[in-house]
Amino acid sequence: MPLLQVKDLEVAFEKEHEELVFVDKVNFHVDEGEILCIVGESGCGKSVTALSIMGLLGQQGRVKSGEVLFNGRDLLKLKEKELDQIRGNEIAMVFQDVMNCLNPSFTVGNQMAEAIRIHLGYDKKKTKEHAIQLLEKVGLPDAKAVMKKYPHMLSGGMRQRVMIAMALICRPKLLIADEPTTALDVTIQLQIMKLLLELRDEYHMSILLITHDIGVVAEEADRVVVMYAGQCVEETDVHSLFKKPAHPYTEALLQSVPTIYGDPARKLKSIPGTVPENYQELEGCRFADRCSYATKECYTKQEYHEVEPGHLVRCWKGLLNNDKQ
Amino acid sequence: MTNNKKPIVVVEGLRKYYPVGNSNTSRARQMVHAVDDVSFEIAEGETLGIVGESGCGKSTIGRQIMALERPNAGKIWYDGQDITAMSESQLRGIRTEFQMIFQDTNSSLNPRKQIYDILATPMLYHKIATKENVKQEVERLLDMVGLAKSSLNKFPHEFSGGQRQRIGIARALSLKPRLLVCDEPVSALDVSVQAQILNLLTSLQEEMNLTYVFIGHGLGAVRYISTRIAVMYLGKIVEIADAKDLFENPQHPYTKALVDASPIPDPNLRDRSRIVISGEIPSPVNPPSGCRYHPRCPYAKEECKKVDMELQVVDSSSSHLCACPFYATNLAKEE
């Protein structure tokens, strides 16, 4: 049984008295100890998916249907209080925008201690020890000094480390990381990614990594889910994704990344047009209008089907496009 | 290959310091050393990429070349004229020749002006178009950057990020410039749109023989568009070389670390050895002595703490300059 299984998840947001489905029948699972990357461009629904797993959608958002099974329990059916037993304890989350996630008017030590007290119920001394130990674990050299600092006194990379330390308080089984390195410089990004990998091995965590960066996917993921316009369009292990992408969107995405490796004269292939605004109303493939392989069959409903074991794709052609080349 | 061409911009000994905080307090004498003694040339028709992490001074250089600010020291010659010595009114005469593209199109396009006004006003002011032919010119510009004519009467918020960047490019080109300073033009865009804009910039360059200064932090994009690349660290250029040479044969330990840190979209290369540099960029208010990279450099020697490293020619046959004299020998020892 996978650690986390998301089945037919549908999330809608209210916009001008109309309910619009932004996450449409999303399916994927995270196995124990693996890193699953959800990759897609802005607005494709990857962050909303993550938030709905945590039950953090807020007022406007609503899960319309589907299941989020964590260790076999459906998180969507739990009461807020029961969910609190899982959130932070077994599933933790780190965000991109760390400055908004840490409270600016409390010291790091204060915020760490609050979480430790609530979740573990330690006394004062033990709380402090645990906090310092965690901050050291995430590679903050002078942990005692960091405890006394306010978030604005730390650099972006250090704040992200504090955030990760907080997520680790209860040794979660699953860490959801929503663009954890997007706001950071590349050298710091590499440090943070290395840290996450080490922690995964040490804590036997699974990581659900949400990113828009194809490079990060190639470096870190075990398996990948590609999302486009609110739908999963492809899911497979990282090697086959890069070797034989089955969905034309995945293929186009891979070809549009400028890289520091390989032929510098290679012409970047861009995807013409933009994501359709009214994609909720489209019946057929949502990528069809931008797809270079599109035919009239593409404008009928596309099933998310398996083309090879473990390789799912939402395109009726499946792996056919690969054979053509 | 760029050496035979006449330089369009020559920067010599450029320094720009900004005061920290309120000037009435005692901290007023503290200065951020944004750019510290930087010299380079840009040849006509080439693209000079400037890369580095946040706070390294790459945008400050862009602003100095655009004559938006006056440097504390140093000179910038544009086409043989020293723009740092010019008065504002003299500058106005040549400002049409160098234009800028910004990262944040939300704040660089006036939200209350229609696209027509955004593009027509500068052309009318600088008498590049007349009242009679301005509409035609605006339409020509839109066509050039790949926007529909129906965009004319829309406002910036009605466009997507990529389209807004196209408007920014059209506006920069409206004055028929020779030099474009592009300050992170694609950093805020999704990859598929990023590729559209990069390809647009390259084709416009070929068409109009433009010279670009391309400032970025994504090494992939900078490599794709640049002829030559300057790597900056804490206000200094540490290495400058032809794009190909820089990636195949990086000489400075910081360049190497930067290249290693950039993710490569190929899972087969995952296990390559990568240098992970520890620590973070020190404060530009009190930059380290000697080589500014020495506190993080795995190869640092005693001398690195004392001697200020100058850019030196790596190999006499090329235009490859590097500010670290030790790296090559270190590498040889490792192998």
Image: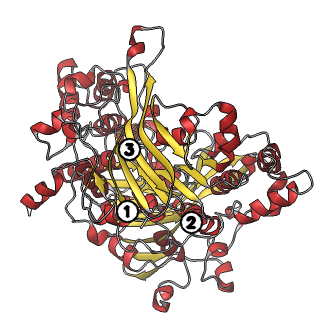
Any part of residue B217 in sight: no
Q: Few, some or many C-alpha atoms within 10 Å of disc 2 (few <14, some 14-19, many ≥20)?
A: some
Q: Quadrant of the C terminus of chain B?
A: bottom left
Q: Secondary structure at mark 2?
A: helix
Q: Earlier in the sequence, mark 1 or mark 3?
A: 3
Residue B130 pos. (x, y %)? 88, 52
- Kindly check if marks 1 and 3 are in contact, taking CB atoms under 8 A apart as contact: no
Quick check: do tags 1 and 2 share a chain?
A: yes
What is the chain letter for disc 2? B
* Residue name at image x 24 percent, y 61 percent: B315
A298 left or right of A128?
A: right
B231 horizontally vs A278: left or right: left
Image disc number at residue B242: 1
Identify the residue at horizontal 31%, vertical 40% (top origin).
A164
Which residue type does callout 2 highlight? Thr
Tell which residue pokes out farthest to the front in this image: B80
Q: What amino acid type should be assigned to the residue bearing mark 3?
A: Glu
The structure residue drawn at horizontal position 44% and vertical position 32%, both measured from the top left corner, is A99
Vertically, is B98 above or below B205?
A: above
Distance between the alpha carbons at the discs numbered 1 and 3 = 20 Å
At which x and y percent is residue A140? 22, 34
- Helix, strand or loop at mark 3: loop
